[in-house]
Amino acid sequence: MSNSRSGSDLPPAVVFVAGFLGSGKTRLLLRAASLLASAGTRTALITNDQGDDLVDTEWAAGRGGDVTGVQGGCFCCRFSDLMGAAEKLLAHEPQVIFAEPVGSCTDLAATVLRPLQSSYGLQLRVAPLTVLIDPERAKEMHTAASDVAYLFQKQIEEADIVCLSKSDLYDGVPELPGISVRRHLSAKTGEGVAAWLDEVLGGTVPAASQALTIDYGRYARAEAALGWLNARVLVDLEAPLSPATLAGPLIDELDEKLTAAGARIAHLKIFDGAPTGSIKIAVCRNGEDPDVEGDLTASPAARHDLVLNLRAEADPELLRKIVEAAFARLPPKIKIVNLQAFQPSPPKPQHRII
């Protein structure tokens, strides 16, 4: 790891890692933050979501470090909130601020990175935009002609650095025609993460270097094709259960019911925070084996704080009905603190510099 990461004479670097829902952005950023911390570099993280109660924010906060979030809209539409979050974190003197945009967001170079360079270039050093790609998702999108596939392609087109994620799940290099891949990463094993950090923080790759032509009408239709559901539920059990025993069957049931209803999952995540430990379970497509992180050996507990995020190609009211039915089958003492089911509003950036 080179010294270019933490030079005290440089302003803090802000590193945006974009990519479609389920590409592994949060896991990569937490792995990178841990790697930097072991080298004595202070980091912070800004998460982003169209709604409230974000699984990734809960999960990242539980791993330690400084975490804040921009909610209720993407970074481009909430640029002022993004800067407020950055200023809040700067009080803790981080040397690197990671930022994770909404997975359905694109045109970040024009609406976020360049405005940052223009107005905050003395306070923040804007790193090149990394776009992370799940190889299986890329194969699905390559031949699709949908608005969602259009959004996926635009995310790749504006990247300064394109990285394939989840390299631990495939042998060799997947063939992805038309996509120029810079690196292959596995946040799970750590493969390639140190080299990516050296490149993204080294100052050799220009930031916001790609000129993107985008149809905002089609972009809006792509986001509107996705139903969005965020929920928080407090559960009190008469017979204590471990987080894995409670959350695991719940995500299996949701996957099954969504599949039966024809709702194509883009990302389904559950965070279960109990006094005995916490876990995060995620699936990125229907019928996929769940990816589990956290304390699988946590002891049974009576009280659980569940946060659920679901993004699927389906009407939000269908998602609401499926999720509410699943919650109704939980033990009787539950309190739904928040449940939002909606389609994202058309993107309206506060700034756009082309």
Image: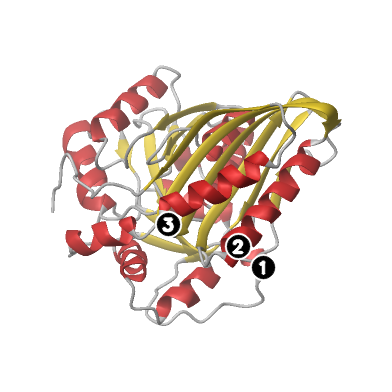
Q: Which mark is residue 166?
A: 2
Residue at 23%, 48% in the rendered image: 347
Tell which of 278 and 251 is nearer to you.
251
| Residue 121 x %, y % | 23, 35
Q: Is residue 292 left or right of residue 221?
A: right
SS class of the residue under badge 3?
loop
Q: Residues within 10 Å of mark 3 (few under 14, many from 20)?
A: many
Residue 154 can be seen, yes or no = yes
Q: Is residue 201 left or right of residue 335?
A: left
Q: Amino acid at mark 1?
A: Leu
Rendered view: 204 above or below 33:
below
Q: Residues within 10 Å of mark 1 (few under 14, many from 20)?
A: few
Q: Amino acid at mark 3?
A: Gly
How much space separates mark 3 and mark 1, taking CA atoms? 18 Å
Residue tagged 1? 169
Tell which of 59 and 345 is nearer to you.
345
SS class of the residue under badge 2?
loop
Q: Amino acid at mark 2?
A: Lys
Residue at 35%, 49% in the rendered image: 343
How much space separates mark 3 and mark 2, taking CA atoms? 13 Å
Residue tagged 3? 19
Q: Residues within 10 Å of mark 2 (few under 14, many from 20)?
A: many
